[in-house]
Amino acid sequence: TQLLEQSPQFLSIQEGENLTVYCNSSSVFSSLQWYRQEPGEGPVLLVTVVTGGEVKKLKRLTFQFGDARKDSSLHITAAQPGDTGLYLCAGDGNAGNMLTFGGGTRLMVKP
Amino acid sequence: DAGITQSPRHKVTETGTPVTLRCHQTENHRYMYWYRQDPGHGLRLIHYSYGVKDTDKGEVSDGYSVSRSKTEDFLLTLESATSSQTSVYFCAVLRGAYGYTFGSGTRLTVV
């Protein structure tokens, strides 16, 4: 079984601060995805990283895939209250196109 | 979005009763998935389907069965509901390069 560990589990910060969320595994993934989930809704895909060492930017969000394709990070610059939500990483091991999810990081950004 | 509809959105049922949750998609995607989401466990795969009448077990399949008689519908059945199956259930489809799209979820309470 492939496991993904996310840290931290909870994060409460002030508007304007920077933060990083980590997603680690001992397994290699063919790709890794980041999702954001709001209360009462399903996760929504933010980005997919495929190549080891890949960096993708989505406005104030920067996603990085580790060189060995076992870990990933999400960095948010100048967080805003609208960034509040549950962030989930998910790895695709390519076994039947199945995603393995991390436990999630619940982010609260206070105005 | 992939036009995913889950029904019902909320359900309360008694222990020992059968329950069926429905996932309907409108874009003919081949792969469909059922996940459950619980605090501290993230999203865990129950069953998935890779085509009509082609299904397989996920990580937490005990107590659940699925059926896919048409491309657009993927049904999840709890044969005899237990309190441990109280959870939020999400259906997802794989949209190729666009990644996974999730429905809005079904909140099931077994009393």
Image: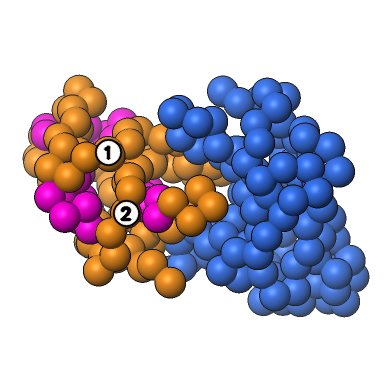
Chain colours: A orange, B blue
Q: Is residue B48 left or right of residue A29?
A: right
Q: Earlier in the sequence, mark 2 or mark 1?
A: 2
Q: Is residue A77 left or right of residue A32?
A: left
The magenta span reads: A64-93
Residue name at image x 22 percent, y 52 percent = A69
Residue name at image x 50 percent, y 38 percent = B100
Q: Return the residue found at the far right.
A: B17
**Is label 2 or label 1 in front?**
2
Is circle 2 on the same chain as circle 1? yes
Residue on which disc 2 sits: A29
Is residue B11 on the magenta stretch?
Answer: no
Residue name at image x 32 percent, y 34 percent = A47
Three-letter amino acid code at the position of disc 1: Val
Residue on which disc 1 sits: A49
Q: Quadrant location of residue B64? A: bottom right
Q: Which mark is residue B32?
A: none
Secondary structure at numbered mark 1: strand
Residue B21 in view, yes or no: no
Q: Quadrant location of residue B13? A: bottom right
Three-letter amino acid code at the position of disc 2: Phe
Say how many tags the image has.
2
Q: Quadrant location of residue B19? A: bottom right
> Crowding at label 2, few (<14), some or many (≥20) Cα neighbours within 10 Å?
many
User: Where is B43 relative to B64, above or below?
Assistant: above
Give the percent coordinates (x, y) of residue B105: 63, 45
